[in-house]
Image (cartoon, grey):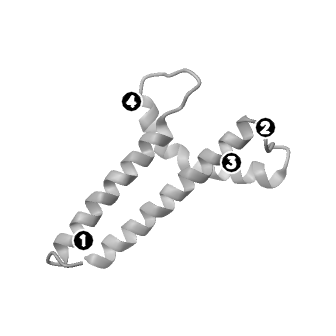
Amino acid sequence: MILLLQIMQVLLNLAWLIIIVQIVLSLLIAFNVINTYNDFVRQLYGGLTQLTEPVYRPIRRILPDFGQIDFSPAVALLGIQLLGIVLTRLAIAASGGVL
Protein backbone atom coordinates (compact mmCIF):
# COMPACT_ATOMS: atom_id res chain seq x y z
CA MET A 1 0.00 0.00 0.00
CA ILE A 2 2.75 2.43 0.94
CA LEU A 3 4.71 1.58 -2.22
CA LEU A 4 1.66 2.38 -4.35
CA LEU A 5 1.24 5.71 -2.59
CA GLN A 6 4.93 6.52 -3.12
CA ILE A 7 4.63 5.71 -6.83
CA MET A 8 1.60 7.98 -7.07
CA GLN A 9 3.55 10.73 -5.29
CA VAL A 10 6.40 10.40 -7.81
CA LEU A 11 3.90 10.64 -10.68
CA LEU A 12 2.38 13.76 -9.13
CA ASN A 13 5.85 15.30 -8.84
CA LEU A 14 6.50 14.47 -12.50
CA ALA A 15 3.18 16.07 -13.52
CA TRP A 16 4.09 19.15 -11.47
CA LEU A 17 7.45 19.40 -13.25
CA ILE A 18 5.88 18.99 -16.70
CA ILE A 19 3.37 21.76 -16.01
CA ILE A 20 6.07 24.11 -14.70
CA VAL A 21 8.29 23.49 -17.73
CA GLN A 22 5.32 24.05 -20.05
CA ILE A 23 4.47 27.33 -18.31
CA VAL A 24 8.06 28.61 -18.51
CA LEU A 25 8.41 27.55 -22.14
CA SER A 26 5.12 29.20 -23.13
CA LEU A 27 6.21 32.44 -21.42
CA LEU A 28 9.56 32.35 -23.21
CA ILE A 29 7.75 31.87 -26.51
CA ALA A 30 5.18 34.59 -25.73
CA PHE A 31 7.88 37.13 -24.92
CA ASN A 32 9.85 36.09 -28.00
CA VAL A 33 12.90 35.00 -26.02
CA ILE A 34 12.87 31.76 -27.96
CA ASN A 35 10.88 31.05 -31.09
CA THR A 36 9.15 28.05 -32.55
CA TYR A 37 11.21 28.16 -35.75
CA ASN A 38 13.69 25.97 -33.90
CA ASP A 39 12.66 22.34 -34.43
CA PHE A 40 13.62 21.27 -30.91
CA VAL A 41 11.61 24.08 -29.29
CA ARG A 42 8.60 23.38 -31.50
CA GLN A 43 8.67 19.64 -30.78
CA LEU A 44 9.21 20.14 -27.05
CA TYR A 45 6.39 22.65 -26.79
CA GLY A 46 4.08 20.46 -28.88
CA GLY A 47 4.82 17.44 -26.74
CA LEU A 48 4.29 19.32 -23.50
CA THR A 49 1.03 20.76 -24.85
CA GLN A 50 -0.20 17.29 -25.76
CA LEU A 51 0.62 16.09 -22.24
CA THR A 52 -0.98 18.99 -20.41
CA GLU A 53 -4.00 19.74 -22.60
CA PRO A 54 -6.11 16.79 -21.30
CA VAL A 55 -5.59 18.16 -17.78
CA TYR A 56 -6.33 21.77 -18.72
CA ARG A 57 -9.41 21.14 -20.88
CA PRO A 58 -11.87 20.20 -18.07
CA ILE A 59 -10.52 23.04 -15.92
CA ARG A 60 -11.07 25.55 -18.75
CA ARG A 61 -14.69 24.40 -19.08
CA ILE A 62 -15.31 25.19 -15.41
CA LEU A 63 -13.37 28.46 -15.09
CA PRO A 64 -14.87 31.68 -16.44
CA ASP A 65 -13.21 33.34 -19.42
CA PHE A 66 -10.47 35.73 -18.30
CA GLY A 67 -9.50 36.85 -21.78
CA GLN A 68 -5.83 36.36 -22.59
CA ILE A 69 -4.92 35.03 -19.13
CA ASP A 70 -5.12 31.26 -18.68
CA PHE A 71 -5.47 30.20 -15.06
CA SER A 72 -5.88 26.49 -15.80
CA PRO A 73 -2.18 25.65 -15.14
CA ALA A 74 -2.41 27.32 -11.73
CA VAL A 75 -5.57 25.39 -10.89
CA ALA A 76 -3.93 22.16 -12.09
CA LEU A 77 -0.88 22.82 -9.89
CA LEU A 78 -3.16 23.52 -6.94
CA GLY A 79 -5.01 20.27 -7.57
CA ILE A 80 -1.75 18.34 -7.75
CA GLN A 81 -0.64 19.87 -4.44
CA LEU A 82 -3.92 18.97 -2.77
CA LEU A 83 -3.77 15.44 -4.10
CA GLY A 84 -0.18 15.18 -2.84
CA ILE A 85 -1.30 16.23 0.64
CA VAL A 86 -4.04 13.60 0.60
CA LEU A 87 -1.58 10.92 -0.51
CA THR A 88 0.86 11.91 2.23
CA ARG A 89 -1.87 11.66 4.85
CA LEU A 90 -2.89 8.26 3.48
CA ALA A 91 0.71 7.05 3.62
CA ILE A 92 1.00 8.18 7.23
CA ALA A 93 -2.26 6.47 8.14
CA ALA A 94 -1.25 3.29 6.29
CA SER A 95 2.07 3.11 8.12
CA GLY A 96 0.38 3.29 11.49
CA GLY A 97 1.19 6.92 12.13
CA VAL A 98 4.96 6.52 11.83
CA LEU A 99 6.58 7.50 8.55
Q: Residue at x 73, y 40 (%)?
A: 29
Horizontal relation, residue 34 to residue 51: left or right:
right
Q: Which residue is mark 2?
A: 32
Query: Where residue 54 sits: x, y (%)?
Result: 50, 45
Q: Residues within 10 Å of mark 3 (few under 14, many from 20)?
A: some
Q: Nearer the viewer, mark 1 or mark 4?
A: 1
Q: Residue at x 43, y 45 (%)?
A: 76
Horizontal relation, residue 72 to residue 1: left or right:
right
Which image quarter is the N terminus in?
A: bottom left
Q: Secondary structure at mark 4?
A: helix
Q: Which residue is mark 4?
A: 62
Q: CA distance from mark 4 to mark 2?
A: 30 Å
Q: Secondary structure at mark 3?
A: helix
Horizontal relation, residue 40 to residue 1: left or right:
right
> Is 45 drawn above or below residue 70 in the view shown?
below
For residue 46, which numbered disc appears in the image?
A: 3
Q: Residue furthest right?
A: 37
